[in-house]
Amino acid sequence: MIKYKLSGTTVQTVICQLEQGQTIFAEPGKFLWKTINVGIETRLTRPVGNQAGAPAAAGGLLQKAMDVTKRALAGESLAFQYFAPSGGSGLVAFAGVVPGELSAIELDGTRGWLTEKATFVAAESSIDFDIAFTGMRAGLRGGDGFILEHFTGAGTLFIAAAGSLTEINPAKYGGKIQVHTGCVVAFEDSLKYGVERVGGLSAQTLMTAAFGAEGINLATLEGDGRVLIQSVTLEALARSLHPYLPGSGEEKRGPLGGLI
């Protein structure tokens, strides 16, 4: 396992200590800083082998094309960045891209984790990356797509969320929970994921969809396993910032809030 330290409050940072022979791969754009003895390399291939310090896949063009296709389907960057020290231990730091909490998940090889897009920060090279399909209907209803990122193997996985994180096990609450579709960050692959409509098609359901800010579909998670839920959705964060972006018209408003 990689030694690490979480720091910060508004936007948390993880500082990883890599020993000789250890490698960590990360999503481009999440790297912050490193010591000079830690090398950085960008590759189109994903880690394989599930062994500590395993290099990226050495396959040919077909392997690279398959890996790039999976990354594209997941809605992420087409390549990974790899970090490895030379001449002893070294430090490298990562963070998410929105204000929020960062979580370190320890995989022991018995269960994998499924994550929404944009949540992955970094992981040991002993962790294998793949994609998983939630089903076309669930994806369309959920509004966040029907492809999740799937991490398996043994090692440490770092993910980031918007706002604060809450961990829940549906088994402690009757075996099933309902979650806002934009708040699901990650969950163990032992759980069954779905999206269901809340209530029948009625005037009250339409009122909830139009004015309740939740819509008429909620994500469901069933079984025994951990779920990580974020307190802020990316859509809500984007809506709150939009009036202050250049060209939004907000900067032209007067002291009466644009009434005149």
Image (cartoon, rainbow, N blue to C red):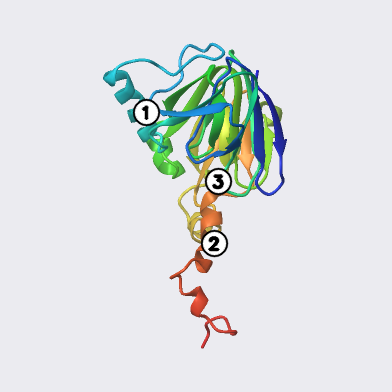
Q: Residue at x 41, y 39 (%)?
A: 145
| Front-lying residue, 256 or 23 | 23
Compared with residue 57, is residue 77 higher up or lower down, i.e. above or below?
A: below
Quadrant of the rendering where the N terminus is positioned: top right
Callout 2: SS: helix
Q: Residue at x 68, y 49 (%)?
A: 10
Compared with residue 202, is residue 5 higher up or lower down, i.e. above or below?
A: above
Q: Which mark is residue 70?
A: 1
Gap between marks 2 and 1 measured at Cα: 31 Å
Callout 3: SS: loop
Gap between marks 1 and 3 measured at Cα: 22 Å
Q: Which residue is mark 3?
A: 97
N-terminal label among 2 and 1: 1
Callout 1: SS: helix
- How many neighbours does mark 1 have within 10 angstroms: few (below 14), some (14-19), or many (20 or more)? many
Q: Is residue 221 visible?
A: no
- Asked if the residue under mark 3 is in contact with the one under mark 2, i.e. CB atoms within 8 Å, the reply is no
Tell whether 183 sits left or right of 146.
right
Location of residue 221 by image quarter: top right
Q: Which residue is mark 2?
A: 241
- Asked if the residue under mark 1 is in contact with the one under mark 2, i.e. CB atoms within 8 Å, the reply is no
Q: Is residue 37 visible?
A: yes
For badge 3, the amino acid type reads Val
Compared with residue 55, is residue 215 higher up or lower down, i.e. above or below?
A: below
For badge 2, the amino acid type reads Leu
